[in-house]
Image (cartoon, rainbow, N blue to C red):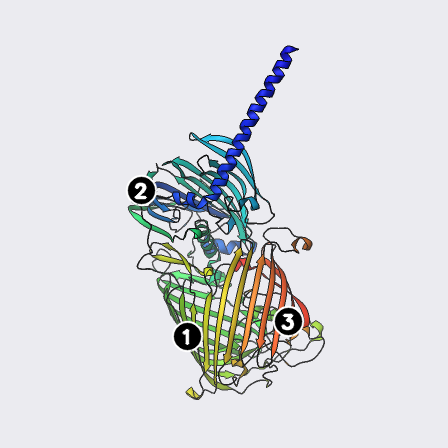
Amino acid sequence: MGFKRLLFFFLQFVLVVFSKEAIAQAILADSVLKLIIKNAPYKSSQLKGYSFKASVTERGKFDHILGVGKNRIAKTEGILENKWFGQKNTNNVQVISLNQTQQEVEKLELYSKKSGKPTPFFWPDFYQDLVGPSCVSPFNYFADYYYNLNYQRDTLIQGQKCFTYNFSPKFTTDRLFKGSFIISETGFLVNMQSIVSSDAIDYQLNLTYQFSLNKWLPLKANFKVIGGVLGNNGVFELEENVISEITASKNVELLQIPSKIQEKLNIAERVFDEVFVSQMLGTLHDSMIQKWKQRPETGVETIDSIRYSPNYTILYQENLNDEKEGNIEFDALKTSKFQPYQLIFSKSFFWGERQKDFYPYEIYYKSPLFDSNYNTAEGFVSAAGLVFRRRWSRYSMFEMEYMARHSFPLDRTTGYGKVRFKTDKSDVVLTGGDYVQQYNSEISISPEMNSLATLLLKNNQMKIYRKQFGSLFFNHKFSSKFFVKTWIEYAKRIQMNNITDYFWINYLNRDFTSNNPTNAEYAVEGFADHKAFTTTFHIGFRPNLTYTYVNDERKPELGSSPLFLFKYRAGWKGVGESVADFHHLELSYIHNVEFSPWIKSGIQINTGTFLGHSPDYFIDYKHFNGNYNLLMTGESLASHRLVGYYQNITTGTNQRLNVSHYTYSTGGPYLEALSITQFSNLWLKPFLGTKKAYVKELLIANFVYLQNRNLIYNEIGYGLDGVFKILRLEGIANFTNGKFNYIGFRININTRIRVGNVID
C-alpha cells in the first residue's frame, strides 16, 4: 500500500513538472510569435546580402480540355491532356533584398517544349501583411483577428530551438491560409506549409528555410497551382532548390532603376483565338510569379538583373519525368502542311527561317465560320479575310489585310483593305473600302448576340449604316503612363433600311424596329446620303503607376493607377464636301480600387459636351453603351446593364425590352458614372444556395445626367460573380428621375477572367 501511494505521488510530481514545462514552452512560443508579428518588417529587411546557386524547375499540364478544342489545341500548340511540359534552369543568385536580385543563368533544360526563357529565382515574403494575390499572411499585424493560431510543440532543427503552430481561418472566405508553420526561438520563419484559394485558383505552398549566416534563409520552395479558365483545367508546379552553400555578399547596395528603360507596349502577338492556350499560360505564369514576389510595403523597387553565363547552354528533352507519351511538343508556333479542312477554322500559316519566338512571314486566314451573322438591314451575311504579315521582331511587323463581306438577300459584296505598320510603341493603320458601321462607333453590340436576339426574340438592337471610306489611325504609346491616339476619316455615309422580317420565334408578336434610330432629342428617322470628314484625338495618362523591372525592361501594374482620358471628336464642314459639323469634348476617369482583400471596386466617370450646337446627324451624337441581351459579352464596367443604344418612338405594352424608352444618345452636356463593387461575403449568398468562397457578391450602381432633357437615369443592381466559376448573374432595377421602371436580369462571363488591366 505504501509503495502504491509513493508511486502515485511520484507520477503526480512528474505530471506537474511536465505540465509546467509545457505551459512555459507554450508561453515562450506565443511570445516569440507576437514578437515576429510586431517586428515582421524588421525580420523581412534582414533577409538580404547573400549569394548561392539555385535550380528552378517548373512543369504544367492540362488534366481537362474542353472536348471541342482538344484536337485543335494539340495540332496548333502541341498540348495534350495529362501531358506534362516544363523546364529547369540553374542560376547563380545574389539576393540584395527579397525583391531585388542579380542572377546569372548557366543552363536551361526544356522538357516537351519548343522554346522558353529562364525563370528567375524568387521567394515570397510572409513577413508582410499581404502576400501573393492579396492573401492575408499568418504574420499579418492583425493575425489574431483572421486566424486561429494553435501552438503544437517545440522541436530542434539544425541545433536551433523552434516552435510548431497549426493555423486556420476564423472566417469562411478565400485569401486566408490554412496549414502549419515553424518559427525559431530567435523569431524567424523556418517552415511554412499552407494552402489558400484566390479567385477560384488553389495554391499549395511549402517553404523550407536553412540556418545560415546566423539567420534563417531560403533552402527549398514548392508551389502548386490548380485552376482553370472556361472549363479548361490544369496544374502548374514550381520547385526551387538552393544547391550550394550560402555565402555573405559584401558591400551590397540596392539596385537603381536602369537609366535606359524599355517597355513592351503593343504586345498583341497574334489573333487571340489562334494561340489561346499559349497566351493564357504565359499570362498566368508571369502573373503568378510577379504576385508572389511583390513587396509593396517596403517602398523598394522590384528589380531583377538577369544575365547569361558565357557558358550558357539550352538542352531539349523529349519528356519530363521519364514519361512515355510520345514526342509531341508544346509550341505556340507549330507549323503543318496545308490541308483543306484547315479552312473551316481561322488559321495562321508560317514560313521562313524561324527566330526564337516568331516566323518572319505569316498568312492568317479568317474563317467565315466565326464571322457570319444575321441582321434586319442585310439579312444573313458572311465575312472572310486574309492577312499577310512580315515580322522583324515579335512586336514589329508590316501587315496587309483584305476583308470581304457578302449579304445573301442583297447579293452584294462589300469589303475593305488595310495596310498596317506596327512596332512595340507605335501603330499606324491605313484603311479604305465599302463596309457597314454601327451607329455606336465603339461597336459594343456583338453581331452574334444581335443575331440570336433578332431570330429568337425579334429584338433587332444593332443599327447600322453603310460607308465608303478611307481612314488613317495612329496610336503611339510614349510609355505605359502616357499615350495618344488619332483617327482621321473621310466617308460617304449611306442610310440602310430593314429589308427582311425573317425570324425563328415570333416572340410576343413583336414588330422589328427601324434600322434608323431616333429619340426624344433627335426625332428625324434616317438621313440623306452625305459626306463627312471627321477626326478623333485621345490622350491617355496614368499618373502613378507602379513597376517591376527585369534588366532594362519595365513592367507596369496597370491597375495601380487611375486612367485619365481626354477625347476630342470633330466633324469638319466644307472639307472635301463634308457636311458633318460638330465638336465633341469628353473627359474620363477610370480606376480599380482594392479596399481590402475581399472588397474591390471599379469606377468609370465620363463627362462631356458639344461645343456650339448639336450634331446634324444622329450618327455623330454621343451614344452610351448598353445591352438588352439576357446574355452579355461586353466589359462589366463599360456599359449600362439595361440601357439600349437608341430610343425609338414606339408604343405597345408588349414591347418591354425590345426598345429602350430610357436611352440617352445626346447632342448636349452629360455626366455618366458606372461602378461595380465586388464582395467576398455581403449578405445574400447563403440564402441563394451557395457558400463557395470563389463566388463573389456584386453591387452595381450606374448614373447618367442629360442636360438637354433634364433627365437623370439610375441603375442599382445585385449580382453573383463566379457561378460555376465562369458566370456572372445580375438583377438590376432602373429609375428615371427617381421613378421606378422595371427590373431586368443579365448573364455574363465573370469579371475575374478579365481582371487586372485597365483598358486603353
| Marks 1 and 2 close (CB-CB < 8 Å) | no
Secondary element at image label 3:
helix
Earlier in the chain: of badge 2 and badge 3, it is: 2
| Marks 2/3: CA–CA distance | 71 Å
Query: Residue 455: which numbered mark, if any?
Result: 3
Image quadrant containing the N terminus: top right
- Residue 448's quadrant in the figure? bottom right
Dot 3 surroundings within 10 Å: few (below 14), some, or many (20 or more)?
many
Residue 101 versus residue 143: which sits nearer the camera? Answer: 143
Query: Residue 249: which numbered mark, if any?
Result: 2
Earlier in the chain: of badge 3 and badge 1, it is: 3
Q: Nearer the viewer, mark 3 or mark 1?
A: 1
Residue 288 versus residue 362: which sits nearer the camera? Answer: 288
Q: Position of residue 603 (x, y in %)?
A: 53, 65
Q: In the displayed structure, would residue 108 be above or below residue 602?
A: above
Q: Position of residue 371 (x, y in %)?
A: 53, 68
Q: Which residue is mark 1?
A: 486
Q: Nearer the viewer, mark 1 or mark 2?
A: 2
Mark 1: amino acid: Thr
Earlier in the chain: of badge 1 and badge 2, it is: 2
Left/right placement of residue 430 relative to residue 607 reads: left
Dot 1 surroundings within 10 Å: few (below 14), some, or many (20 or more)?
some
Question: Can you see residue 455?
Answer: yes
Secondary element at image label 1:
strand
Left/right placement of residue 515 relative to residue 585 reads: right
Q: Position of residue 532 (x, y in %)?
A: 46, 84
Dot 2 surroundings within 10 Å: few (below 14), some, or many (20 or more)?
some
Question: Can you see residue 326?
Answer: no
Which residue is found at the position 33% from the left and 60% from the top? 261
Secondary element at image label 2:
loop
Q: Position of residue 538 (x, y in %)?
A: 43, 73
Mark 3: amino acid: Leu
